[in-house]
Amino acid sequence: MHSIPSKGRPYNDILEEMESFRQKDVNYHEGRTWSLVYHLNNEHTDFLKQAHGLYFSENALNPMAFKSLKRFEHEVIRMTANLLHGDENVVGTMTSGGTESCLLPVLTYRELAKRKKRFGSFYPEMIAPESIHVAWEKGAKYFGVKMVSIPLQENYQVDLNALIKKINKNTIMIVASAPSYPHGVIDPIEKLGQIAVDHKIPFHVDSCLGGFMLPFIEMEGYKVTPFDFRVPGVTSISADVHKYGFAAKGASTVLYRNMDYLKHQFFIHQDWPGGVFASPALLGTRPGGAIAAAWAALNAIGMDGYRKIAGTIMETTKILIDGINGIEGLKVMGKPAMSVFAFTSTYREVNIFAVGDQMEKRGWHVDRLQRPEGLHAMVTPSHQQVTEKYLEDLKVSVEIVRLDPKLGAKGNAAMYGMIAKVPFRKLIKKEVLKMMEKMYGPECEMPLDEPGKESLPIKVVVKILNKINWLRKK
Ligand SMILES: Cc1ncc(COP(=O)(O)O)c(C=O)c1O
């Protein structure tokens, strides 16, 4: 049992200890990770820390108290609205991240639909492609809205015919991606906008990944299918400053075409003994540092800087995509719109998860996709220096797996492969829940692959398979 040390310790000792704890974390500085961190360069990071530090204690909960923070938020929203071709009526709020920018529109459109309905039963539903970020499932769950998932076509865009069939009187919103997290593909936003207009349904574009990338690559001459407020029918957009905006973590935006939508996001309670309470988004206390650093990032990088960065990222992405497609047995999935993509194996004997294991052995932090199986990458400036090594290691990894296909039945490959194939998906959910209970329980058991110790996920899979065998025998 841990308790707060009875006697405080010197700052320096603690900082040193924390440095030592970091040693086992993934190494993003050298481009070894392909998600989680959007690192521009050390100079920019130091600048962000300073901007963040200036507002370390400030709280945007009360904009009257910290007028400078309100100004930063307002200007970040205006700059983002402008970037996404919104007119002067576009409004929005900053949020703590992509997830909050996905949760809030679910609440907003549910409230809007409820107001419009006024009487009768209310069973709100939202429609989204299967590839939509999982944060939307979370939103549906949190706000009591039924998620209606639409299958993808072969090109990984949502199937419009299937989508139209699911629209009914309970539909409160449609949401699609620009681009999607799994395959980096932009859904057919213009057609969806038309469907939304025809059916008078709000339509949100999740551009958490693309909001600060697609506009700049378009300026650089890349073809980008319209995805923003230029498209009639798009009523709101989420765009993360803490991803390709290269701000500090904890900064995103959610924008609406006008106040008629945004006002349903606000929370006001007039009778609380603590005073009349008004809040624009999910959080109560809103960390000032993240808002200030987002404003600072946009001002420091500027349009010219973002265009240059986007250009470099796209060049790096092209090298990677061409290189991967050039490796026999691999292919990039669909047509990625920008710098997010996934690839899979074209050979039966090459298990893509086993390739992932080999890459991990070579020091790469690998993200895996399921249904269909693949490996995932989000390209950032730090990857420019590692393309050659990555492709070289990938080629070797594919060759190793091709020569020893049994690797697909070992280690993490076996585990992820089995998880992807388990037919009873609810069993996975149940077992993962147990795993989380252990991780967040008093013992804090971590799913670590320590030598000689079976990792928690492996135990979970073994349990699931045993259960399936038992069910089959019955
Ligand atoms: C398309 C999309 N939407 C939403 C999110 C959630 O963002 P966050 O992790 O900042 O909460 C992500 C994260 O990668 C994303 O790719």
Image (tube, helix red, strand yellow):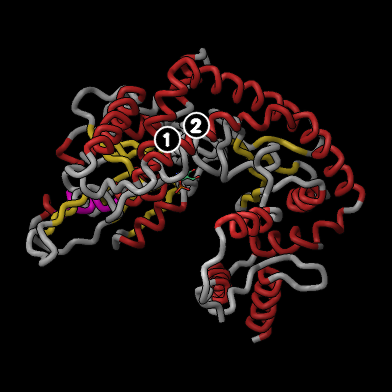
Q: Is mark 1 within 8 Å of ligand 1?
A: no
Query: At 55% across and 22% down in the image, what residue appears?
Result: 309
Q: Which residue shows up at 77% across the image and 36% down it?
A: 390
SS at mark 1 in the image: helix
- Seen in the picture, residue 286 relative to 394 is either above or below; the reply is below
The percent coordinates of residue 436 (x first, y second) are 54, 71
Q: In which quadrant will I find the C terminus?
A: bottom right
Report the label total: 2
Mark 2–mark 1 Cα distance, whole angstroms, equals: 6 Å
Q: Mark 1 sits on what residue?
A: 51
> Which quadrant, please, contains the N terminus?
bottom right
| Residue type at the position of mark 2 | Phe
Is 107 magenta? The answer is yes
Residue found at the far top of this picture: 221
Residue 384: tell me if it is visible: yes
Q: What residue appears at the point 16 percent right and 52 percent down from the top-left corner?
A: 278
Magenta segment main secondary structure: helix
Q: At 26% across and 50% down in the image, what residue appears?
A: 171
Image location of residue 159, percent across then percent down: 45, 41
Q: Nearer the viewer, residue 177 or 438?
A: 438
For disc 2, the marked residue is: 47
Specify the amino acid type for callout 1: Ala
Closer to the camera, 464 or 339? Answer: 339
Q: Is residue 321 above or below residue 440?
A: above
The residue segment tinted magenta is 106-114
Is 75 located above or below residue 55 in the figure? above
User: Where on the picture, by quarter, is residue 140?
Assistant: bottom left
What x and y, as percent, mark residue 125?
A: 29, 55
Left/right placement of residue 128 relative to residue 24 reads left
The reply, left or right, for residue 279 in relation to residue 7 is left
